[in-house]
Amino acid sequence: MLLEIKNLHARIAGNEILKGINLKVNAGEVHAIMGPNGSGKSTLASVLAGREEFEVTQGEIIYNDKNLLELSPEDRAREGVFLAFQYPVEIPGVSNTNLLKTAVNEIRKYRGEQELDAMEFLTLLREKSKLVELDQKFLSRSVNEGFSGGEKKRNEIFQMAVLNPTLAVLDETDSGLDIDALRIVANGVNKLKRKDNATIVVTHYQRLLNYIVPDFVHVLYQGKIAKSGGKELALELEEKGYDWIKNGKAEVVNA
Amino acid sequence: MSTTETQKIEELTNKEYKFGFVTDIETDSLPKGLNEDTIRQLSAKKNEPEWMTERRLKAFRHWLTMEEPKWSNVTFPPVDYQDISYYSAPKNKPKYNSLDEVDPELLETYKKLGISLEEQKALAGVAVDAVFDSVSVATTFKEKLNELGIIFCSMSEAIREHPELIQKYLNSVVPITDNYYAALNSAVFSDGSFAYVPKGVRCPMELSTYFRINAANTGQFERTLIVADEGAYVSYLEGCTAPMRDENQLHAAVVELVAFDNATIKYSTVQNWYPGDKDGKGGIYNFVTKRGACRGVNSKISWTQVETGSAITWKYPSCILQGDNSIGEFYSVAVTNNMQQADTGTKMIHIGKNTRSTIVSKGISAGKSQNSYRGLVKITKKAENARNFSQCDSLLLGDKCGAHTFPYLEIKNSTAQVEHEATTSKIGEDQIFYLNQRGISTEDAISLIVNGYCKEVFKELPMEFAVEAQKLLSISLEGSVG
């Protein structure tokens, strides 16, 4: 098993957001986490990445036989956990290339691998930028500075392609994307899918799941997984709306 | 800032200054104290002509009538000018033809700083006039420069060998009466560099001097004069580090630049003097007067500075834009940490028609430091169509430091266009977390963010110096910003 979340409770500024999450993810699987606003989807993504504002009060996360919660955010990244941010930040004056070169080599150093030289690195960048149809000019531009919403999201998937994670968490990657950008982003994610990696797609809408087909769908409600199922659950949800979950609390699994 | 970041900042802040060491070389010093006799002795030790001795005395007498200025946004205990030795020279000081003849311990010192002369010699054409304490000990590439008629030598040598140029240009931009520290420097300046680039000559290499304060209790009073004649071009690099000291050391340098018709002078500084320990003990007082005169039409003077050191920095590299169409530029990165204080900026004085000036100032404050930008843009009555663009950005790391901006505008001509932009930002936790999530440590993340923030200034530095500047910034970030 790649990831196992057991009875995870987390809070921010004294408010409990996650109230006992249980989730198992195997290598080769795509999981979708859906749910209404405020249900805790983004909190779950942030806790997985190690954002410090969120305090884990109970439970554990086992990733690749390691206690994930004991690792610093950078070590989680070096162990292969990648978060595609809902709101990617701008870093003026730091080029995409510079960021990625530093990141790739830090990760390689951590794994005891040789650092890439300039040529090898540029070859890697060119190859991966095609995957998300990212114009070469973005490589030398400052990270996300002056990017449109869609460009920022595409840039996240580009970074993901370069860093080649084992566990990718996509936090509302579809928000703010037009249909063409959505297709490109989804294609990128699909092409990166392998037998030995897994993806968790956090989304509010079913739309993205037309392009990234999940093996499992989990509905998060009030900090717990209220319902789990196959890809058809997303369609059912689209049809009936989240009220269906809200009103049908008796069906709660994993409680 | 979150707790761990604050801790990280504190932890890194507590690292010791990397370049703190003292080279053990016998020095030949004057006893402490300042009076007319000291100045005569100093002048005599340097074999100066009578006219120079008289100039020094004139400056000294004027200095006695002046008072220490108090207007800056820095505080420090009063300096006891009688408790300073005004002359200190390494003993074995004859001029060397090659580096092999130089005291190996001196070379070792440079090596520790990562700026060894050999390395520099090997580097593509950097001529070095190294100032170790007060006397030049090594001058290279001189012959090559000689062929082009370029004079590049120590100030002491220039006074002896080129008195006509020195008499004409020394104090022609910064008069001896200009300010307290400039008057003091004019009286007691120890040594420094002189460069003259004749008409139509483009200096084929970067001219470079490394300053270093070494002997204890030696106030260092550097004097630099650069003259670019009509159509000439010269790029001058000044870089400094100093060994650790417990007592405050006063550094009051004067730099004068003169550019004639169609001439360009580019002056770049990387300054990393000992800033004092984390409680503010020790450290250099850096009270410098730097000024350039664009005397001719289409002349250009560009100042670029990266300031990471000194306990107190108080300086305003300025441009007097006299010639029509002349251009003044000021690009600055000033980093303060712990108890450091900096009050720095520029003055752009527009006198000629169609004169243009650009100011880009990036202040970075960490620890409990105070970082002030102070800049004057003055457009005089006759300066038709003058243009100025100023951008002053402040970056705060932590919540105990301060950033201040004091822009002054004096506009006497209605055709002027003056723009001023200012921003203050804190280094974002979001930015750090974003980079952490990509596998980059917090320390490296901050280094990346800060280097990105300074990019506009770094790109103005000559290539080899830009690398050095980034290195210095990283070192000072290691020990300062977290």
Image: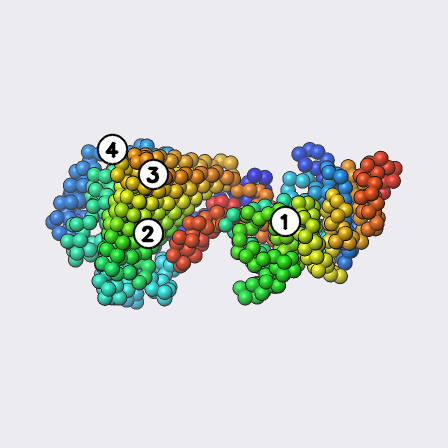
Which structural element holds mark 1? helix
Q: Chain of mark 1?
A: A
* Number of the label disc, if any, that sits on residue B267: 2
Are dots 2 and 1 in contact, CB under 8 Å? no
Say which of B428 and B69 sits in front.
Answer: B428
Q: Crowdedness of circle 1 by 10 Å Cα count: few (<14), some, many (20+)?
A: some
**Mark 4–mark 3 CB contact (< 8 Å):** no
Q: Earlier in the sequence, mark 2 or mark 4?
A: 4
Q: Are marks 2 and 3 on the same chain?
A: yes
The amino acid type found where label 3 is placed reads Ala
Q: Position of residue B276 (x, y in %)?
A: 40, 43
- The label nearer to you, 1 versus 4, is 1
Of the two numbered discs 2 and 3 on the same chain, state the one appearing first in sequence.
2
Label 3 sits on residue: B416
Give how far apart the Cα atoms at labels 4 and 3 are. 36 Å
Report helix, strand or loop for mark 4.
loop
Asked which secondary structure carries label 2, the reply is strand
Numbered mark located on residue B67 in the image: 4
Q: Is residue A140 above or below residue A120?
A: above
* Residue, disc 1: A150
Task: Kindly identify which chain the residue marked by label 3 belongs to.
Answer: B
Which residue shows up at 34% across the image and 38% down it? B416
Secondary structure of the residue carrying tag 3 is loop
Q: Quadrant of the C terminus of chain A?
A: top right
Q: Quadrant of the N terminus of chain A?
A: bottom right
Question: In this view of the protein, which residue sits in the foreground, B25 or B311?
Answer: B311
